[in-house]
Image (tube, rainbow, N blue to C red):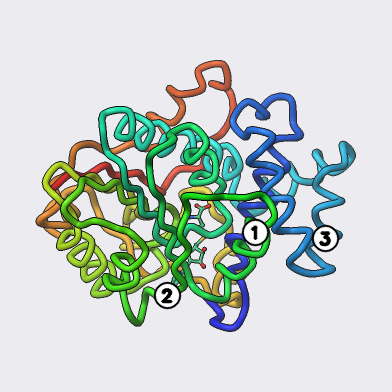
Amino acid sequence: MQHEQASRTALLIAASLVLLHHDAKYSRFVSKASADLCARVLEKHSAKTRLFLKIVRQIWFRPIAKFIERITIPGILLHYALRKKCIGELVRSALASGVAQVVILGAGFDPLSSELQQEFSTALFWEIDHPATQCHKVRACSEIGIERVHFIAVDLSAAGPDREALISNGFDPAKRTFWIAEGLLMYFPADIVSSLMKTASTLSAPGSEFAFTFMEKQGYGQLRFDSQTKLVDSWLRRRGEPFLWGTTRSELAEFIRPWRVIRFFDHNDLRDMASDLSDEIIAKGEVICLAVI
Ligand SMILES: C[S@@+](CC[C@H](N)C(=O)[O-])C[C@H]1O[C@@H](n2cnc3c(N)ncnc32)[C@H](O)[C@@H]1O
């Protein structure tokens, strides 16, 4: 990412969630509270995102959004919605079974921790993100009273999850933790991904889980969504957010040790979560992995 500006992809996801919430077909995937938080970020970020927010809320924009999706990454909106639903279900199940700590790496403007802190009254949350992105989230959250979410601003490519900052903000490495890295690791080179995984493992009591996403390597080692057009490759490069890391499922098992793969969720598994949308395209290429230690 460009280090002095908020992540463009995080802003795009926030706008996508607002768009999905306002579309009757997809609104069940994004609660009003989540869409409101994303809208607040866009409203406060800049005049441009304020205008964009106004546009994405208009009915006339929906066919234009569909067109833009078709010429960039067909099925990406539904992929975002179902990726979030899948990870949301995994973390809720861990919280229901007694895990009380959740750390979200590269949280961006994801409303997940704000939703979960209302549902799970004793759980604690930490969001670790780049300062240039996180300051906009903190500003938006300061008005809505998010109590049990601690924000830690760190450049993960330089420092990794900050052990001291986590512990001084109430994190207890002796307790089981659920880690999340959604839409993050593909932006780092392999050595940084490996060191992030290792640091997280040293902070994790046995039984801790890690849900993260990765780009599944295609033929010729390409790192992209199956349907991604060249337009997107150049947009990500220009915005300083090109995909740097991807792997195969078999290589991953060795790569993430001491974490152990529990299961993968790909576009087919995501499709099973929305059987009434079976005729819709879901972007293929980014896979969710649930691992345990
Ligand atoms: C594609 S967004 C995903 C946001 C969120 N996880 C989601 O899925 O909605 C990528 C996130 O990674 C964060 N990120 C990228 N590079 C980073 C770095 N070097 N250090 C910390 N965070 C970084 C960005 O700030 C952004 O929030």
The kind of residue on which mark 1 rests is Ser
Q: Is residue 250 above or below residue 42?
A: above
Asked if labels 3 and 2 touch by Cβ distance under 8 angstroms, the answer is: no
Please give left or right for residue 203 compared with residue 232 in the image: left
Q: Which residue is mark 1?
A: 142
Nearer the observer, 171 or 131: 171
In the image, 206 versus 236, the foreground residue is: 206
What amino acid is found at the position of numbered circle 2 in the picture?
A: Val
> Which residue does the image show at 55% across and 75% down from the upper left?
237
Mark 3 — residue?
50
Of helix, strand and loop, which one carries label 3?
A: helix
Task: Tell me if mark 2 has few (under 14), some (14-19) or many (20+) residues whose alpha carbon lies within 10 angstroms of its own.
Answer: many
User: Which element carries disc 2, helix, strand or loop?
Assistant: loop
Mark 2 and mark 1 lie on one chain; the one further toward the N terminus is 1
Q: Position of residue 5 (x, y in %)?
A: 62, 78
Residue carrying label 2: 154
Marks 2 and 3, Cα distance to the nearest angstrom? 26 Å
